Amino acid sequence: MNMQEIKAIAQQRGVKAGSLKKAELVRAIQRGEGNEECFATGRSATCEQSACLWKGDCN
């Protein structure tokens, strides 16, 4: 997912993108949704969130 798409999702969810980097912005969206802020933290191999919107880009 590119930054433009992520910023659109952030805007829909009321999260201000500002100058956040991709991983920071995704984690801010996760936090706003009440989910674990785990994007790009190196835990994707053990992640059990199969329905996660970010799963394809995570590492």
Image: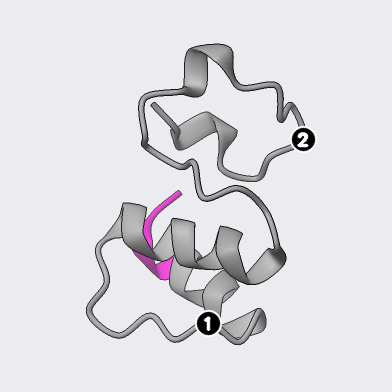
Q: Residue at x 38, y 80 (%)?
A: 17
Residue closest to the eye, 3 or 43: 43
Q: Residue at x 65, y 82 (%)?
A: 12
Specify the quadrant that holds the C terminus. Answer: top left
Residue 36, compared with residue 51, is above or below; it is below
Q: Residue at x 51, y 50 (%)?
A: 37
Whole-percent x, y for residue 33 in the image: 69, 65
Residue closest to the eye, 4 or 34: 34
Whether 47 is among the magenta residues is no
Quadrant position of residue 52: top right
Q: Main secondary structure of the magenta part?
A: helix
**What is the residue that sits farthest to the top in this orientation?**
45
Residue closest to the eye, 19 or 7: 19
Whether 4 is among the magenta residues is yes
The amino acid type, in three-letter code, at marker 2 is: Ala
Residue 36, compared with residue 48, is above or below; it is below
Whole-percent x, y for residue 2 in the image: 38, 55
The amino acid type, in three-letter code, at marker 1 is: Val
Q: Which residue is mark 1?
A: 15
Tell me whether the residue at label 2 lies in contact with that at label 1, contact meaning CB atoms closer than 8 angstroms: no
Whole-Å distance between the Cαs marked 2 and 1?
A: 21 Å
Q: Residue at x 77, y 35 (%)?
A: 51
Q: How many marks?
A: 2
Whole-percent x, y for residue 20 in the image: 27, 71
Q: Secondary structure at mark 1?
A: loop
**What is the residue that sits farthest to the right in this orientation?**
51
10 Å crowding of disc 1: few (<14), some (14-19), many (20+): some
How did the renderer colour the structure? one colour
Quadrant position of residue 4: bottom left
Over which residues does the magenta segment extend? 1-5
Q: Which residue is mark 2?
A: 51
Q: Earlier in the sequence, mark 2 or mark 1?
A: 1
